[in-house]
Amino acid sequence: MRLLLFGPPGAGKGTQARKLVDRYTLTQIATGNIIRAAMKNDTPVGREAKSYVEQGELVPDDVVRKLAEGAIADEGYDDFILDGYPRTLQQATWLTTFLSEHDASLQAVLSLEVDDEEIVDRLSKRRVHAETGENYHLDVNPPPADVDEELIVQRPDDKPETVRNRLSVYRDQTEPLKSYYKERDLLVPVDGTGTPDEVHERIADTLTTLA
Ligand code: AMP
């Protein structure tokens, strides 16, 4: 399978990607995770990306392109689910060309649909495990009691001012990709509300209709 999970920040892309990885033979390729790891390890890419990420801006296209294409090549151009890439029309056109050059076009773009109010609530209540990257939501999916509280942190870019900027960047630069994929008959909207398991079952049902 070659899938893309699409949606605004906080739509549940990361959570759903991990659930799909647990159920199918797939690898999650999340440019946000790759970038955060690069920042943590203070690599040249991490240093370049840092100020963009901290302000809720997009990292320049050519930087992210290399990360994404490298990760896809590492998977042998198959059995992956993209999460958070592409995020601009330029990235999408590069991706289409790159995948078609390797006979590996996308099979579906699963678009998680969640309204703005819920997104702001989810992001403000999102917490992550500093070491494993596991996501939690303070009300719906709180960290288990046996996890060291000090390791449960808020992503710096989940602070309210940055969230507002990320959402406006999404509307301006990323949401137009829906039309791009709709025109190519790849866009599959999925209701992203409800519990993570409910959304996962909806996605799984969708995948059986694609197969
Ligand atoms: P995420 O974890 O997907 O929310 O990504 C966190 C941050 O990493 C984003 O707010 C951007 O600054 C950067 N980022 C991740 N993926 C991309 C991408 N495809 N294009 C540009 N910037 C990205």
Image: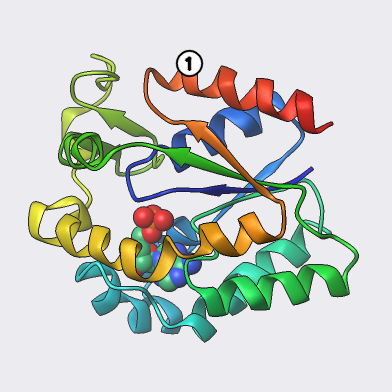
Query: To which residue does mark 1 refer?
Result: 198
Place of residue 10 in the rendered image (x, y in percent of width and height, measured from the top left): 32, 43
Q: Quadrant of ligand 1?
A: bottom left
Q: Which residue occupies the foreground of this view, 75 or 17?
A: 17
SS for dot 1: helix
Place of residue 15 in the rendered image (x, y in percent of width and height, measured from the top left): 45, 34
Q: Which residue occupies the foreground of this view, 55 or 181?
A: 181
Q: Residue furthest right?
A: 103
Residue 123 horizontal side relative to residue 181, left or right: left
Judge: label 1 CB < 8 Å from ligand 1. no
Is residue 123 positioned above or below 171 on the image?
above
Residue 168 horizontal side relative to residue 82, left or right: left
The N terminus is located in which quarter? top right
Q: Is residue 40 visible?
A: no
Residue 31 horizontal side relative to residue 167, left or right: right
Is residue 121 positioned above or below 61 on the image?
above
Q: Quadrant of residue 153?
A: top left
Residue at (55, 61) in percent of width and height: 179
Q: Label 1 is placed on what type of residue?
A: Glu
Q: Residue furthest left?
A: 161
Residue at (44, 48) in percent of width and height: 7
Place of residue 165 in the rendered image (x, y in percent of width and height, measured from the top left): 19, 65
Q: Is residue 127 visible?
A: yes
The C terminus is located in which quarter? top right
What color scheme is it?
Answer: rainbow
Place of residue 83 in the rendered image (x, y in percent of width and height, measured from the top left): 53, 51
